[in-house]
Amino acid sequence: MRLLLVEDQAMVRGALEALLNLEDDIDVVATANNGVQATAFLAAKPDAVDIVVTDIQMPELDGIGLCQHIRQHHRGLPVVMLTTFARAGYLKRALDAGAEGFLLKDAPAERLAMALRDVNAGRKVIDSELALSAMGSQDPLTDKERQALKLAQQGLNTAAIGQKMCLSQGTVRNYLSEAISKLHASNRIDAARIAAEKGWI
């Protein structure tokens, strides 16, 4: 099976590529540093890969955004997500985006190879530890609240967030206030921290 490997950390990307290429039936045919590079590759060569293996947290376009793009433009192309962090929120967002697989990066290489074979055969594969932790963990944020918090986490003020989201400052303040209340946080930065720890942004 032919893979596109998307990972922003060069050392991790190189190690994963080397380990996966040791498998007789797996060939990493292309790599990308982020989701933007991955979408460009897929647009140029839509039939070049059988599975996309991607990190979740990346600059420019993260794994969730990449998965959503693939669902819209490359239907039928499976996506397997990898993460360093065992956060239930990541799992829910990945599944909502349409991912077929979700594994921790510290899983043994044989486990990843087996998971890729399962996904290639049409089955979903989810790390059991994450699946257990996800039970009973519900994200209370709306998409707009999540987006506003993510921008606040990047250090943007209300006016800048409003520009990014095409909203008035008052509306942005309302979204942030709702998020702070839902997360029982002391301020927007505290709310962003809590949401990040849960994997909700």
Image (tube, grey):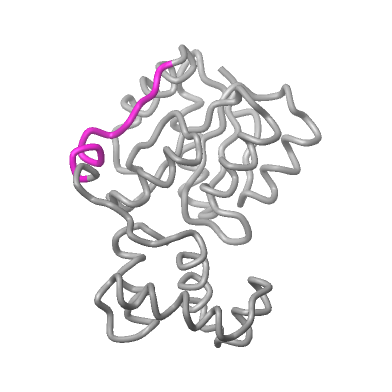
Q: Is residue 131 magenta?
A: yes
Image side of residue 127 versus residue 33, left or right: left
Q: Position of residue 20 (x, y in %)?
A: 47, 28
Q: Is residue 30 magenta?
A: no
- At 42% from the left and 47% from the top, the residue drawn is 93
Quadrant showing the C terminus:
bottom left
Quadrant for residue 44, please give it: top right
Please identify the residue farthest to the right as the structure is shown. Answer: 44
The magenta region covers 123-133
Quadrant for residue 129, please give it: top left
Q: Position of residue 173 (x, y in %)?
A: 49, 83
Image side of residue 131 versus residue 51, left or right: left
Q: Position of residue 50 (x, y in %)?
A: 60, 21
- At 68% from the left and 51% from the top, the residue drawn is 36
Number of marks: 0
- At 47% from the left and 50% from the top, the residue drawn is 56
Q: Position of residue 116 (x, y in %)?
A: 44, 23
Quadrant showing the N terminus:
top right
- At 32% from the left and 31% from the top, the residue drawn is 126
Foreground of the two, 84 or 191: 191
Foreground of the two, 41 or 10: 41
